[in-house]
Amino acid sequence: MLENKFKTKLIKTIKTRFPGSFVFHLDPNELQGAPDLLVLYENKWAALEGKKNGKASLRPNQQHYVDLFDKMSFAKIIFPENAEEVLDEMERAFKV
C-alpha cells in the first residue's frame, strides 16, 4: 500500500473512531522530522508519523520528534501492520 493511500484511510478511521476530532497534515518543511499528522480530540492531542509499512525507513529527526511529542502527550509511528494497536493505545491515552 502506498503511504498516502494508507494515510487517507487512517484519517477516515480516526474521524470515525474519535467523532468530532480534527486531523491536520503538518508541513514537513516547517520542522524537518515532525510527525505527519496532528490529531486534536476534545482536550487531548496526538501526533502520528505514518509509514507505508513497518520496514520503511525514518527520515532524519523523525524518531527524535516522535519521542519528544510522546512525552508531551501522545505520539507514535504508525503503519498498516500496527495501526490497530496504535489507535487502541491512542484511545487509552485520550481517556486519561
Image: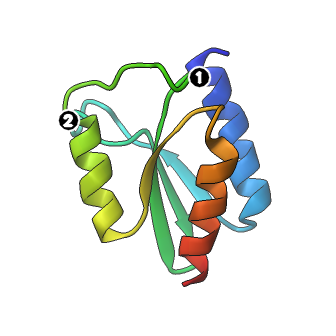
Query: How many C-alpha atoms fall within 10 Å of the one at disc 2: few (<14), some, or many (≥20)?
Result: some
**Image location of residue 2, percent across then percent down:** 62, 15
The amino acid type of the residue labelled 2 equals Asn
How many numbered discs sit on the rendered protein? 2
**Image location of residue 53, percent across then percent down:** 56, 23
Query: How many C-alpha atoms fall within 10 Å of the one at disc 1: few (<14), some, or many (≥20)?
Result: few
- Which mark lies nearer to you, 2 or 1? 2
Q: For residue 80, what is the image quadrant?
A: top right
Residue at the image position 59 percent from the left and 52 percent from the top: 86
Residue at the image position 71 percent from the left and 65 percent from the top: 18
**Image location of residue 69, percent across then percent down:** 30, 59
Residue 22 as seen in the image, left or right of residue 36: right
**Image location of residue 5, percent across then percent down:** 67, 22
Callout 2: helix, strand or loop? loop
Q: Does residue 1 sit above or below 50 in this rendering?
A: above
Residue on which disc 1 sits: 4
Q: Earlier in the sequence, mark 2 or mark 1?
A: 1
Residue at the image position 24 percent from the left and 57 percent from the top: 68
Residue on which disc 2 sits: 61
Quadrant containing the C terminus is: bottom right
Extreme residue in the right direction: 16
State the CA–CA distance, disc 2 to disc 1: 20 Å
Q: Does residue 18 sit above or below 64 in this rendering?
A: below
